[in-house]
Amino acid sequence: MTARAPRFDFFIAIGLVLGLLVVARMTDWEQKVITCSSGFAVTNPSKSTELVADCETLLSIRDDLQGSGDLHWAANTPMADWAGVTIAGPPQRVTGLNLSGMGLDGYLTGLLGDLTGLTTLDLSANHLTGRLPSKLARLTRLRNVSLAGTSFVGCMPPVLVATATNDVTATGLHECDRPPLMSYDTVLTPGTYRVTKEGRPFMFDVPEGLTLQYRATILSRYTYMSLEDPATGAQVWIQVSNEGSGGYQLYSFEGNNATRQWVIDLLEQVIKSTWFY
């Protein structure tokens, strides 16, 4: 056997070391959390703050919306490549969602109402279920809506009925009436409710599969709204900020472990549906 030259062995060793360094750097990179502000999904995020917010909203609704489907939206992929998403501007915003026939079988959360730049919304030919969020009322720029072939229940938000082009009659849903005011000890069945006491008035939705009972509200800088599921005894306090754009969060939870996750999942929908009007 012919011995390799020492110089050749040296270059092999250098190559191995460099390879290990590259792997180490990749591992370190993978551990970093990539967000909509990282520069992948949104180019120059510091100058496109509204598009960054839209990006975060889409990622927040993705899993609930797609169900067993797959939208392939990710923070490490340019938004220009996201299926069904149209971006226009300036300022750059998400102006269109064309998700027709994409095999989606999830549901809508109120967070969709944060995409206030939307002019086109096409969810047709998907097995989407649940109620249409009242927070869609914030989508005042909508001009084109298609919901044919979906399985939504409840009623149709007026903002969708009022669009220039729509097929909302194909859903068989009637236009929503003005939501009732919530009062103490009211049993809340699936639907939309208004809270107009001191502080900023707001609305929220109770999703299908959940019945709540309004127990208490403490009004100050924040509104703490106590809701209880009569069937399970599970209770939640929802904190609503009365300042700025507001915020909603699951404040605390009481209930047994058997019902905890199921109730929390539904209560998260309540929180996501909350909005000031």
Image: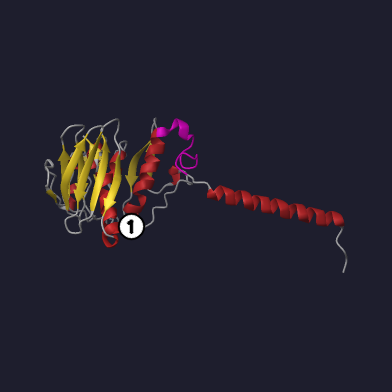
- Image location (x, y in percent) of residue 190: 16, 51
Q: Quadrant of the C terminus?
A: top left
Magenta span dominant secondary structure: loop
Between residue 141 and residue 153, name the one nearer to us: 153
Residue at the image position 28 percent from the left and 53 percent from the top? 264
> Considering depth in this image, is 55 or 27 the residue closer to the camera?
27
Q: Amino acid at mark 1?
A: Gly
Name which residue lies at 32% across and 36% down: 117
Q: Is residue 5 magenta?
A: no
Across and down, in percent, residue 114 comes to 31, 39
Q: Which segment did they paint magenta?
A: 35-49
Residue 81 can be seen in this image: yes
- Pinpoint residue 143: horizontal percent, then vertical percent: 25, 38
| Neighbour tally class for label 1: few under 14, some 14-19, many 20 plus, Cα within 10 Å | some
On-image quarter of the N terminus: bottom right
Mark 1, secondary structure of its residue: loop
Which residue is labeled 1 in the image? 67
Residue 153, relative to residue 40: is it above or below?
A: below
Q: Could you tell me which residue is drawn at 36 percent across and 58 percent down?
A: 69
Residue furthest toward the bottom?
1
